[in-house]
Amino acid sequence: MDGLIGVKDVRQVLKIMIGNEVEKYSLKADDLDEIAKQVIGEADMDNTGFLGFSEFKKIMGRCPEFEG
């Protein structure tokens, strides 16, 4: 555990969220990889390819349902 969020981590979360409904969304493994890369790329402010806590906090701040 390195305290960073990478593409592999985001892909794993996407798989959990979608579960057995992959066909319903017409997604392939490559699609999940591309979505995960886009998520990291959008939030990765220091261009390391990973999200640290401050980057994660900032991207979550964009989601009103996570404010509190």
Image (spheres, helix red, strand yellow):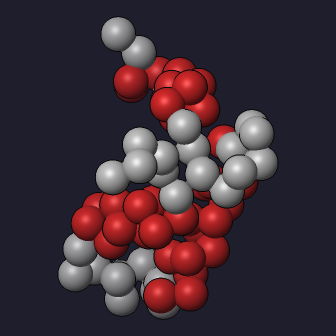
Task: Tell me which corner region of the image, top left, top right, bottom left or bottom right, holds residue 10.
Answer: bottom left
Q: Determine if residue 57 is in view.
A: yes
The residue shown at (54%, 37%) is 52
The residue shown at (29%, 62%) is 17
65 w.r.t. 1: above or below: above
- Residue 44 is situated, as x and y percent measured from the top left of the image, at 69, 44
- Residue 6 is situated, as x and y percent measured from the top left of the image, at 52, 58
65 w.r.t. 68: above or below: below
The residue shown at (34%, 60%) is 13
Task: Tell me which corner region of the image, top left, top right, bottom left or bottom right, holds residue 58.
Answer: top right
Q: Residue furthest front?
A: 2
Q: Is residue 27 left or right of residue 40?
A: left
Q: Residue furthest left?
A: 20
- Residue 5 is situated, as x and y percent measured from the top left of the image, at 48, 50
- Residue 63 is situated, as x and y percent measured from the top left of the image, at 50, 28
In front of the other: 57 or 61: 57
Q: Determine if residue 62 is in view.
A: no
Q: Is residue 40 left or right of residue 45?
A: left
Task: Tell me which corner region of the image, top left, top right, bottom left or bottom right, holds residue 35.
Answer: bottom right
State the count of labels.
0
20 w.r.t. 36: above or below: below
Is the C terminus in the top left, top right, bottom left or bottom right quadrant? Answer: top left
The residue shown at (41%, 43%) is 3
